[in-house]
Image (cartoon, helix red, strand yellow):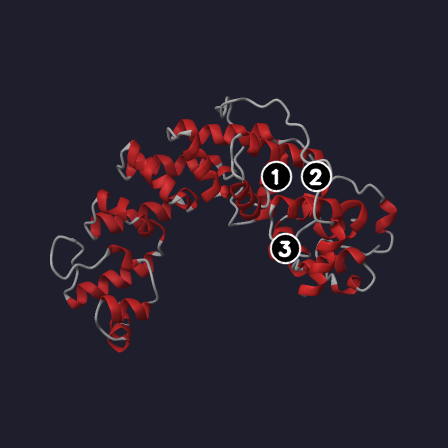
């Protein structure tokens, strides 16, 4: 696999000639969204469905017509869901996908994607895009995962991709930050600069962020910037109004654990109620250990319940026999039981049977 991958990377070359395209005129400050736009679909539910929604907002077709319809004549029976295996031996494009580590079995389950992929020509449609991604910093070993999530990158104009990259550079994102953004959010470069600018502006204005904090947020959790905005608003309301965190505390939570804004609102509310009202954990302590809000309910309940069963519930660092709150979220059950609760797995398993 490694040798095949090296061959593909060698084919696409190591550098773009002529450097980046001239930067287009871009606003000096992050713009604030003037109107409400349809929400993006949730990434964790269906990445492809989310991108469909982005394109619908742009009033564009998800899959534009193949430039050369004759290229599909070799595959007359292609259907939305089928097995790529029958075509790998005679398709150079599929062979290159395999060499890059693309998971074809995931692509073949997505409506419209197989036809799009089979219509691609490696030299004409793929080589320059792969070179662009590698020059942007996407690691060779991550190309397969990137293209599995977003093969539609090959339908984007390279000039547009350059402009979107230039935008990040104009906003003083460092090269390593841009690499992380593009790698962690394969759909980022599919979205035009005006939309990205509005999204960054929304987070800057809503959470009173400085420029460096906007960059830190986008780099830490790039998926959040293009996430379902209605969902972000709901979780913001929940954190501030229903959970009772002050504005500066909401900002602190966002920068520390932006994924809080991507989990289901009901789960967030329930988790906070249990931690704050049942366990009596203060807002200040939750701010110090925000991982609690991202930890599965069952884990917190089991570990807290076991400590209560042993008479060891003591989360105040100023008192003796202090139990760090982070231990409820971190480590394996065995580590928690033996190192934190100072018990054994047999006792813990017997306790779990009582729940």
Of the image marks 2 and 1, the number of the one nearer the N terminus: 2
- Quarter of the picture containing the N terminus is bottom right
Q: Give the Cα distance between marks 1 and 3.
A: 18 Å
Pointer 1 local density, CA inside 10 Å: few below 14, some 14–19, many at least 20: some
Tell me, yes or no, whether the two marked residues, 1 and 3, touch with CB atoms within 8 Å: no
- Quarter of the picture containing the C terminus is bottom left
Q: Nearer the viewer, residue 293 or 59?
A: 293
Q: Is residue 144 left or right of residue 319?
A: right
Asked if one can make out residue 37 in the rendered structure from this viewpoint, the answer is no
> Looking at the image, which residue sits at the far bottom?
346
Tell me, yes or no, whether the two marked residues, 2 and 1, touch with CB atoms within 8 Å: yes
User: Residue 341: x percent and y percent?
Assistant: 22, 67
> Looking at the image, which residue sits at the far left?
319
* Residue where numbered disc 1 is placed: 189
Which residue is at 46% across, 36% downward?
215
SS of the residue under disc 1: helix
Give me the disc on residue 156: 2
């Amino acid at each position: 696999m490694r040798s095949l991958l090296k061959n593909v990377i060698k084919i696409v070359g190591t550098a773009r000639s002529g450097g980046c395209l001239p930067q287009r005129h871009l606003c000096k400050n992050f713009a604030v969204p003037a109107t409400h736009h349809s929400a993006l679909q949730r990434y964790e539910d269906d990445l492809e469905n989310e991108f469909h929604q982005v394109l619908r907002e742009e009033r564009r077709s998800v899959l534009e017509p193949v430039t050369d319809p004759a290229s599909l004549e070799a595959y007359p029976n292609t259907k939305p869901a089928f097995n790529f295996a029958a075509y790998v031996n005679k398709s150079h494009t599929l062979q290159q996908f395999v060499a890059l580590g693309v998971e074809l079995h995931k692509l073949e389950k997505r409506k419209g994607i197989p036809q799009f992929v089979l219509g691609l020509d490696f030299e004409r449609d793929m080589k320059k895009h792969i070179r662009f991604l590698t020059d942007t910093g996407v690691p060779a070993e991550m190309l397969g995962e990137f293209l599995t999530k977003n093969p539609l990158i090959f339908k984007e104009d390279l000039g547009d991709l350059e402009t979107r990259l230039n935008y990040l550079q104009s906003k003083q994102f460092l090269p390593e930050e841009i690499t992380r953004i593009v790698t962690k959010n394969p759909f980022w470069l599919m979205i035009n600069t005006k939309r990205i600018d509005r999204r960054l502006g929304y987070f800057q204005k809503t959470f009173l962020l400085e420029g460096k904090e906007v960059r830190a947020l986008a780099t830490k959790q790039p998926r959040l910037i293009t996430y379902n905005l209605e969902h972000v608003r709901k979780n913001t309301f929940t954190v501030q109004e229903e959970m009772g965190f002050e504005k500066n505390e909401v900002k602190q939570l966002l920068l520390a654990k932006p994924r809080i804004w991507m989990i289901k609102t009901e789960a967030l509310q329930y988790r906070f109620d249990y931690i704050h009202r049942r366990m009596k954990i203060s807002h200040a302590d939750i701010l110090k250990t925000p991982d609690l809000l991202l930890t599965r309910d069952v884990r917190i309940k089991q570990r807290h319940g076991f400590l209560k069963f042993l008479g060891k519930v003591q989360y105040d660092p100023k008192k003796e026999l202090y139990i760090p709150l982070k231990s409820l979220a971190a480590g394996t059950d065995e580590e928690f039981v033996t190192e934190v609760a100072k018990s054994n797995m047999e006792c813990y398993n017997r306790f779990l049977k009582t729940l």
